[in-house]
């Protein structure tokens, strides 16, 4: 099962549209995750119409329309793994222990907010993944997103994709 992970798209404030490389991943993904800060409903409409399955949440920059359509925390069981998606997890310091305590029933937590790619495993086994942002690199050298595969109850082939600079 192929996964596509993104967050913090901030359209149309940080970019006019999603990058072509990211859009090309949509038909290949069995499940698409979006960890919030959409800003516009058009991006949600697009991902709902183009994704086989969408697991998504709202973020701190999302207004009432998006909050009415999306939860703060979403769950999905995929190939024997228990996933959660949320926008904010708090400061980087202590994140693993804090999230392991808050989400003891999860195997993988997909989050956003910082625009900083993150891949760590907490004591006890909770995997924390932040795909960064495909449209707003902030203090990072690249805009990013992630892909992964769920295979035999494990998360494999995790790739952080760096997007070329917008021209």
Image: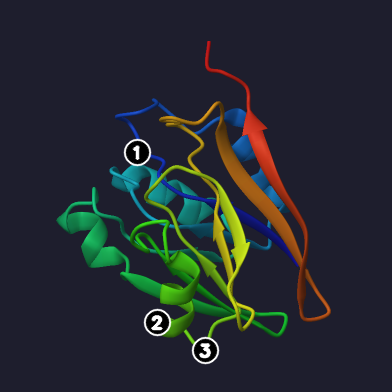
Rendered image quadrant of residue 74: bottom left
Mark pair 2, 1: CA separation: 27 Å
* Marker disc for residue 112: none
Decide which of tag 2 and tag 1 comes sooner along the chain.
1
Residue 117: give x, y in percent of width and height: 55, 46
Rendered image quadrant of residue 123: bottom right
Residue 134: give x, y in percent of width and height: 51, 36
Mark 2, residues whose alpha carbon is within 10 Å: few (<14), some, or many (≥20)? few
* Left or right for 152, reference 143: right
Task: Kindly identify the residue that appears in the image at 65 percent across and 33 percent down.
Answer: 162
Label 1: which residue?
10
Residue 63: give x, y in percent of width and height: 18, 52
Label 3: which residue?
105
Q: How many circles with numbers are drawn on the protein?
A: 3
Mark pair 3, 1: CA separation: 30 Å
Looking at this view, is 19 or 120 the one in front?
A: 120
Mark 3 residue element: loop
Label 2: which residue?
102
Are the two marked residues, 2 and 1, in contact with CB atoms closer than 8 angstroms? Answer: no
Q: Is residue 66 above or below residue 38?
A: below
Mark 3, residues whose alpha carbon is within 10 Å: few (<14), some, or many (≥20)? few
Q: Nearer the viewer, mark 2 or mark 1?
A: 2
């Amino acid at each position: 099962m192929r996964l596509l992970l993104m967050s913090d798209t901030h359209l149309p404030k940080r970019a006019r549209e999603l990058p072509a490389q990211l859009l090309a991943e949509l038909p290949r993904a069995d499940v698409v995750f979006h960890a919030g800060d959409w800003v516009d409903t058009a991006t949600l409409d697009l991902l709902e119409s183009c994704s086989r399955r969408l697991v998504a949440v709202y973020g701190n920059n999302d207004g009432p329309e998006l909050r009415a359509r999306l939860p703060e925390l979403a769950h999905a069981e995929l190939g024997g793994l228990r996933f959660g998606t949320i926008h904010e997890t708090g400061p980087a310091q202590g994140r693993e222990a804090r999230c392991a305590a808050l989400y003891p029933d999860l195997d993988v937590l997909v989050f956003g907010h910082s625009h900083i790619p993150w891949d760590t495993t907490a004591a006890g086994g909770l995997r924390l993944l932040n795909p960064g942002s495909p449209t707003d690199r902030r203090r990072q050298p690249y805009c990013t997103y992630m892909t992964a595969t769920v295979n035999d109850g494990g998360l494999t082939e995790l790739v952080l994709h760096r997007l070329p600079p917008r021209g």
